[in-house]
Amino acid sequence: MPHTVLVLGGSGFVGRHVVAKLVDAGHRVVVPTRRRDRARDVMLLPTVTIVETDVHDPAKLAALVGRADVVVNLVGILHEEGGQTFARAHVELPRKVIAACEAAGVKRLVHMSALGAAPDGPSKYQRSKGEAEGLVASSGLDWTIFRPSVIFGRGDSFLTMFARLVRLLPVVALAAPAARFQPVWIGDVAHCFARSVDDDRTVGQRYDLAGPSVYTLRELVTYVGDLTGHRRPIVPLGPGLSQLQARMLELLPVKLMTRDNLASMQQDNVSPDPFPALFGIAPKPLEAIAPEYLGPGAARSRYDEYRAHGGR
């Protein structure tokens, strides 16, 4: 059954893939954004409406929610900067979304959290995500919560960052080299979000989304170096030097790492549970996807991944 789905964060990395999947499933999609040009990757998709607005404004958010059958909240930040804080993005906005849904009589809410989210987590990021989970779960709405591990795919902010670093640096000084991750492909994440929208079996459920393999950070950086043809010596940093490096990197105009990111890596970003069978897919391994956008022969177009995996 087609729905009108409001996707908050629909112009971002995860959002544009979720929006494409929702369109493929026949839904009408509304994507709010502060600047229309930020949504250029989805604005030409059929059944997508772009609305230039501020979702943090309760009145404007209420107007958007009032037009929807389903709300998908993908809004999240990795670094605090200026007025963009974890509390504002991860706690205050979900609270406003819940209030708007309740006022408009919209019952269905699909929310993106993160693997490792917990009110008592070691980082502000994890604690804010954990607090938001609590708000959503106690809301009385028909909610579903997804908790992905680090997400990879063309345009990601994780493997792509390391690919740039190994091209530029003769040696990689690596903080938290033993931190463990279970990367999950963006296409699999988007599939689960889109499938959950009208699947009542997912109501009231939390799902970890993690790939088939676990890697240390050092293994991931080594793999990216091999894949790009720029393998570099890796100098593992201990806790003290890792803190110093994170403190220095915080000062850069583009934050590569912060002390809060480092705190998150104190906890393994892996799931004890298998990929949820309900969604009918086996998660793609990193090695099957990463060469498509990081390898020497990778296609340059940012639309190639849509064409290859979206049937276009």
Image (spheres, rainbow, N blue to C red):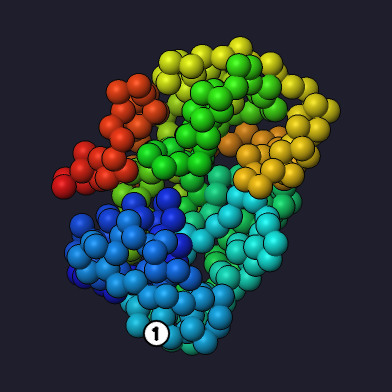
Residue 7 seen from this side: no
Locate residue 192, reporting x and y percent. 35, 51
Q: In the displayed structure, does residue 54 sit left or right of residue 190?
A: right
Look at 38% across and 39% down and name the residue there: 154
- The crowd level at tag 1 (other Cα within 10 Å; few <14, some 14-19, many 20+) is some
Location of residue 40 with respect to 31 vertically, above or below:
above
- Toward the viewer: 42 or 277? 42
- Residue 167 showing in the rendered view: yes
In which quadrant is the N terminus drawn? bottom left
Q: Is residue 287 left or right of residue 85?
A: left
Q: Quadrant of residue 218?
A: top right
- The location of residue 290, given as percent across then percent down, is 38, 29
Where does label 1 land, which residue?
66
For the point 43% across and 15% down, which residue is it? Answer: 229
Name the residue: 31% across, 28% down: 298
Left or right of 278 in this view: 61? right
Out of 156 and 131, give the one closest to the viewer: 156
Q: Where is residue 81 drawn, in percent x and y?
A: 68, 57
The kind of residue tagged 1 is: Gly
Judge whether 236 appears above or below 298 on screen: above
Task: Describe the element under mark 1 as helix, strand or loop.
Answer: loop
Q: Is residue 195 above or below residue 139?
A: above
> Which residue ends up furthest to the left in the rendered image?
312
